[in-house]
Amino acid sequence: MDKYEILKKYFGYDTFRNAQETLIDHILEGNDAVGIMPTGAGKSLCYQIPALLMDGITLVISPLISLMKDQVGSLNQAGIHAAFLNSSLTANQYYKALNFAKQGRYPIIYVAPERLVTDEFLDFALNSKIAMVAVDEAHCISQWGQDFRPSYLKIAEFIGKLHKRPVVSGFTATATKAVRDDIIDILQLQNPMVMTTGFDRSNLYFGVVSGKDRYGAVRNYLETHQGNSGIIYCLTRRQVEEICERFIKDGFLATRYHAGLSDEERRKNQDDFIYDRVPLMICTSAFGMGIDKSNVRFVLHFGMPKNIESYYQEAGRAGRDGEPAECILYYSSKDVITNQLFIEHSQDNGELDAATKAIMKERDQDRLRKMTFYCFTNDCLRDYILKYFGEYGSNYCGNCSNCFTQFEQTDVTEIAKALLGCVESSRQRYGTTVIIDTVHGANTAKIKNYRMDENPYYSTLNQVPGYRIRQVLNYLQIEGYLFVTEDDYGIVKLTEKSGHILEEGKGIVMKLAKESSRQTGNSRDQGRKNKKGSFQKDAFTKKEESLFEKLRALRLEIAREEKVPPYIVFSDKTLTHMCLVKPKTKEEMMTVSGVGQFKFEKYGQRFLICISNHAQ
């Protein structure tokens, strides 16, 4: 078989997407490669298809058990023999799988990096023909990546021990230039092709919502999206427990996931979500990597993550099927303090020396600052994220909360001068709340104790709404006119640019939302959902919508028989295509995206009968 026959037979697609074919050809020619491709762009095919065509075994290095289990389950369902080797296996299961691997039964083997240097695995690798080592989630090898794993540093050591160097490839969805350079250097890649297809996920809507009642805002969102599968990320385990309990009391079917639960409960709760028994997962960042659930229609953040990389990776778990999905961050200023505490007391990366830890702490603080600015900016949210990763667009995507908000250019020079003057005259000793309260004329005990009611700028902005003063102060931070220290006190400091306003009289104009369009805590409604709150089936007639539900029921029935997640049988996107094509024969069914030869032989006839019965 060639690459096109494999693509159709096992994966059900007629054509490659984006740079898939280029990377596959490069690897098949025996060359190293790095693929930076957004979630849902088909990174795994770039090493799975070569693995089926190369002479030898492909080892896929993967960081998490759940990721391996999901990938191997999908391959086995597609008719491809694959296995994983990690700590989830008993000793008997591990040695049995290793024995089968020695016999050449598996063209693809997923392995945890810690296993690479064990005597048993080395004995297998040194006596087998390893054609390729593919590193999944390759950003984990970089100390500047958001999920650095010291165990990933063992990969190059392992490759160096092999009798013949295999092709080496690395793949990730989120990587800055520094991380890309690290992947190439640490893996010791030889003249690799570096293919970046772009970070944009155009099917995702991005939004930021701030307000005092975060729980109420999220509850209102869920009430209008009942039946859809979604994830809510929280900053702490305690927060997960509290809001999961509240949502269940409010009548939502939800489950939870964090590192404080037992292995058994985490596994059960994750399976309940993946197998569509529970539509709502409330979790910490411990959940999600490697979860290939394709029909997640929304990812909500009940708090701000510590950096853009983490946020984009977590948000990217929505809409993996390419259909519209929503990613909304519910922000509070307390989130900054929580994340600063995480950075200060991080126990990660214990193998690093003190100097490197200090550098990483500084980098983490800088990334937290940029994540905070994401929550403040009035510019296009998608464009802000893409710029972070080195891509530049038009600053208007038409699919984020800022692009849906009406803005007007407003002169805020006088507000800016008052804020900077207050910071200067108080000798840069106070935090943002004291500065804002001073210029706003607050009559509080703290203001009196600090004698800020005697400051020359006290009450100079008493006619300006407090939220507007804070918006301008945030803008001055983003633009570098002010700096807030990242210690426990958060002191506001002047910068070199402050003099442009204070001494040179530079005017400041910023985009501000018109009063009538300010968000009140609810997500916008683009008018693209049908009455059931579904995103991907707007063009359906009532009869097609009924057919979709019948196909979903059949898929669930088959998934329970096969003991696999429903999306592994067929994705929502494939079911949607079936409803539009309404195939009557095998030939017509094979034109449906995601239906390959192997899956048709297993399930195709049952879906054809379901479609036929519905038509009658």
Image: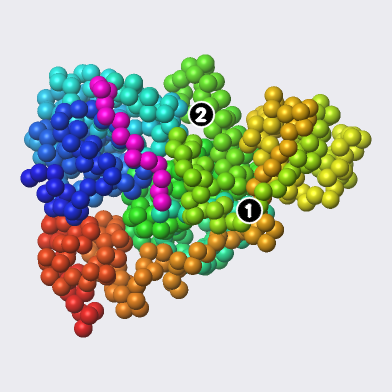
Q: CA distance from mark 1 to mark 2?
A: 43 Å
Is residue 548 on the magenta stretch? no
Within 10 Å of disc 2 (Cα), the crowding (few <14, some 14-19, many 20+) is: few
Residue 231: percent from the left, percent from the top? 45, 54
Is residue 200 on the magenta stretch? yes
Residue sitting nearer the eye, 529 or 60: 529
Amino acid on which the number 2 mark rests in the picture: Gln
Q: Which residues are magenta?
A: 189-202
**According to the image, label 1 marks what residue?**
407
Quarter where residue 144 is shown: top left
On screen, residue 350 versus residue 151, left or right, reads right
Residue 64: percent from the left, percent from the top? 34, 39
Instruction: Name the residue located 32 percent from the left edge and 24 percent from the top edge.
Output: 184
- Dominant secondary structure of the magenta stretch? loop
Instruction: Name the residue located 11 percent from the left edge and 32 percent from the top edge.
Output: 56
Residue sitting nearer the eye, 9 or 120: 9
Instruction: Name the residue located 73 percent from the left edge and 45 percent from the top edge.
Output: 411
Q: Quadrant of the C terminus?
A: bottom left
| SS for dot 1 | strand
Compared to residue 63, the image places residue 245 above or below, namely: below
Within 10 Å of disc 1 (Cα), the crowding (few <14, some 14-19, many 20+) is: some
**According to the image, label 2 marks what residue?**
347
Q: Hey, which residue is sitting farthest right in the picture? A: 454
Amino acid on which the number 1 mark rests in the picture: Phe
Q: Quadrant of the N terminus?
A: top left
On screen, residue 102 versus residue 611, left or right, reads left
